[in-house]
Amino acid sequence: MYKERIFTVLLTILLFISSGAFSQSSTGKIVVNADLGKNTISKHIYGHFSEHLGHCIYGGYWVGEDAEIPNTNGIRNDVVEALKKVNIPNLRWPGGCFADEYHWRDGIGPRENRPKMINTHWGGVTEDNSFGTHEFFELCRQLNTEPVICGNVGSGTVEEMSKWVEYINSDNVSPMADLRRENGQEESWGVQYWGVGNENWGCGGNMTPEFYADQYKRYATFCRNYGDKELRKIAGGANVDDYNWTEVCMKKIPHHMMWGLSLHHYTTNWWDKGPATGFSEDRYFETLERCIKIEGVIDRHMTIMDKYDPEKKVALVVDEWGAWYNVEPGTNPGFLFQQNTLRDAFIAGISLNYFNERCDRIKMANIAQTVNVLQALIFTREDKIVLTPTYHIFEMYKVHQNATLLPTHLKCDSYEYKNKKIDQLSVSSSVSEDGTVHVSIVNVHPNKSSELTIDLRGKKVSKAMARILTSDALDDHNTFENPNTIKPTEFSNFKLKNNIITANMPAKSVIVFDIK
Ligand code: AHR
């Protein structure tokens, strides 16, 4: 009897081992030097981009004063409320490709007199210009966020751009400032961030970098400073790995003329974008691999910038980033509407960790695009909104805004798939003014948890709290019918002893620790 029982126990152990259950956890060791931080993570890394595209502006923010959807001066209250909760630091507008065919004078004055145009880039729909300069600044006022305007180089003129700056920023007696006053805005808005064109290597005019650099100098010269605020001008940057574009801009444009140089990087396979939901593990792995590759590409651009600007005076501005998949079946292909899943939460978490880590050069980044388009934070339908997993990452990570980056060392196992591998974990840490340390960690492995240790050095830790974002399936998402499938919850499965946190971090999850 006794022998039989021993045999059964041994057999159970053997079966347990051979089932692979032992291999369902791996390790991750994180060391955070809490007293060695130097650089500030600009809050503008957590910035946004909203274009006249699909239902981003129209239906996303703007419903008009007469709409039944609760609004303030025509702008949806629910969207404003939700974005204020992520401390939205800036908003880039009006494009995108749309910027280089936008003529700002079409969007001012009484709405009934504003001319209509065709939005040739995005679905060929009629743009009635009901959302223009005044409406954009009203949106920024309600959001308490900094405007980032992108001016038209591709089809505009130097004079047109120069006058837009004057219209927005001049408090003098001047034709443009007077026109603004006639249109109901007495005080200038004092915009600070100004993009000079968008993707001028492509939809913004198909220019060579040499030609663009010369054009930039002309346009930037006439974007004047008004009052005591210096305009922070952003030169249109390279497409993904076009290093020559960065090289030429850094060489030809005097650095005092550009606050920043931009870069666009979408996580996408341009030949075969794949679906936003219902994807295979092949797709999942490939997407994450692409997301992580951004690091090498951006590092190479920064190496070029370092060569010309070792003091890092010119910022790298990643003013369009995020996942880009096939549009949802049955929707307008020009509206770029895609679902948003746990996979997108990982893309957001990994990208933001990386931007934090490079905050000595990256001073601004803008996810594309805030509402209803590409990797959106919010979906709207009539009077309802849905917060996506990407929204929840921005909300969980907001603790990093303006905090000091902490040197963080990570040693972790890999997520291996079909003879390829990527790091299972991604991490970044910061300390905010009140001394709280924030550690954000992504575990991309679909089925392996991680036995995690976080070794806090240079700080006496008394307590810690954490929140987690996870779900059963990688393509779980929130819908109007089930808006809360994925949302952050408290995570308490960890121990704190001798300044070291040990935790079992579940597979496919994001955790943010707040450590006091
Ligand atoms: O975000 C969608 C588009 O992607 C933008 O309009 C353009 O700048 C980029 O190619």
Image (cartoon, grey):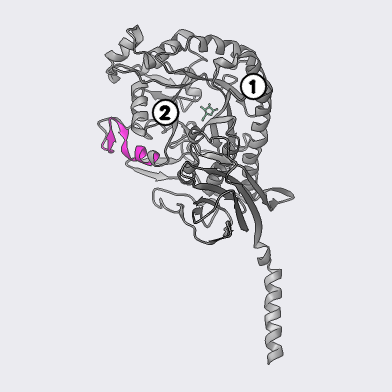
Examine the rendered structure and indicate whether residue 95 appears above or below residue 179. Answer: below
Q: Report x, y in % for residue 385.
A: 37, 43
Q: Which of the 4 quarters of the picture holds residue 302?
A: top right
Examine the rendered structure and indicate whether residue 175 appears above or below residue 206. Answer: above
209 in magenta? no
Amino acid type, residue under disc 2 in the picture = Glu
Q: Report x, y in % for residue 306.
A: 66, 25
* Camera sees residue 48: yes
In screen coordinates, is 489 left or right of 203? left
Q: Nearer the viewer, residue 359 or 372?
A: 359
Q: Nearer the viewer, residue 442 or 101?
A: 442
Marked residue nearer the N-terminal end (1 or 2): 2
Q: What residue did someone put label 1 on?
A: 309
Question: Ligand 1: does it lie within 8 Å of the C-beta at label 2?
Answer: no
Examine the rendered structure and indicate whether residue 46 appears above or below residue 222. Answer: below
Instruction: Give the extent of the magenta segment.
Output: 68-83
* Camera sees residue 446: no
Q: Nearer the viewer, residue 348 or 283?
A: 348
Q: Report x, y in % for residue 365.
A: 53, 32
71 in magenta? yes
Instruction: State the CA–CA distance, disc 1 to disc 2.
Output: 26 Å
In screen coordinates, is 173 left or right of 473? left
Q: Nearer the viewer, mark 1 or mark 2?
A: 1
Amino acid type, residue under disc 1 in the picture = Asp
Q: What residue did someone put label 2 on?
A: 146
